[in-house]
Amino acid sequence: MSFFESVILGLAQGLSEFLPISSSGHLALLEHFFGIDEDRVLFFATLLHLGTLFSIFFVYHKDIWALLRELGAVFADIFSGRGPRVNANETRRLGFMILAATVPTAIVGVLLRDLFSRLYGSIFAIGAGLLITGSMMFVSERMARGNLDVPNVGFRHAFFVGLMQSAALCPGISRSGATITGGLASGMKRELAVRFAFLISIPSVIGAILLEAPGAFGAGVEGSALPALGVGVAVAMLSGFFAIKAMIRVVSIGKLRYFSFYTWALGAAAVAYALLR
């Protein structure tokens, strides 16, 4: 893989992982048009996921550290006989909400993994997913009427957002777009909808890395390609950081629908290409 390909793929992963335009769709399309065999970049794709994971850590390090501390407190309460005390404080409740959102994603991901893998190779399916993403972004702002914060959000709402995230396992459907739409539809405040969307992506991304790791290490990588891969991962991490910051701003001012036009155009082009080639 050349430095140019590595940078382009890293930039696509970093931006599209957090902007509501679908990272899986963009990477699949780029691999197709660059003529890159998916198996040849499996190791690199796993590293790119790791790079974007670091982006979330940088932006939400205070939340993550607080959640980890609270996890230790949960175990202490359980061992002392007081139980998990789900509503002991806002941070603990947020942690259990993240767990509730992760359950449907994990179940769907494990059960339908082979199906999603096959769809990854279909330009038509990717284009259809992008069209769905655009439609979600267009209607999401109409749903942004809620004012629920962590103490007021029900676990059924968190589970629903997790279901929306599981839909994003289909290439072309944006994870951030689906989860933010789910949060807004559940009545969450704008700030909480985007914050929750990115926090619940952490266990999902870690799970994806663990699932991909055996195949990635089995495929291996040539030593001469490591510098290019390192540059690509750095690009993914930095662009991901700025994409998260941009999304926080975009959601707060209610401009999500502008992403619809881009994803509709790209999705329509992909569908047309798949039908006409």
Image: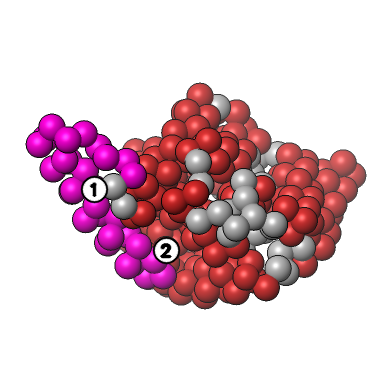
The answer to whether 116 appears left or right of 230 in the picture is right
Q: Residue at x 25, y 37 (%)?
A: 84
Q: Is residue 266 magenta?
A: no
**Please, which residue is most extreme toward the top here?**
111
Q: Is mark 1 on a helix, strand or loop?
A: helix
- Callout 2 environment at 10 Å: few (<14), some (14 to 19), or many (20+)? many
Which contiguous range is marked in magenta? 58-87
In the foreground, 218 or 87: 87
Q: Is mark 2 on a helix, strand or loop?
A: helix
Q: Residue at x 83, y 59 (%)?
A: 265
Work out whether mark 1 precedes mark 2 in sequence or the reverse, and give the earlier one.
2
Percent from the top left, x then y, of residue 123?
74, 44
The answer to whether 237 appears left or right of 244 in the picture is left
Q: Does the magenta stretch include residue 70?
A: yes
Asked if one can make out residue 251 in the rendered structure from this viewpoint, the answer is: yes
Q: Looking at the image, how many numbered discs can be counted on the residues? A: 2
- Callout 1 environment at 10 Å: few (<14), some (14 to 19), or many (20+)? some
- On residue 145, which mark appears? none
- On residue 71, which mark appears? 1
The answer to whether 121 appears left or right of 80 in the picture is right
Q: Which amino acid does label 1 sit on?
A: Leu
In front: label 1 or label 2: 1
Q: Residue at x 52, y 29 (%)?
A: 108
Name the main secondary structure of what is drawn in magenta. Answer: helix
In the foreground, 43 or 205: 205
Give how far apart the Cα atoms at labels 1 and 2 are.
Answer: 19 Å
Up-down relation of residue 106 to residue 197 (above or below) = above
Q: Which amino acid does label 2 sit on?
A: Ile
In the foreground, 92 or 169: 92
- On residue 56, which mark appears? 2
Up-down relation of residue 273 to residue 253 (above or below) = above
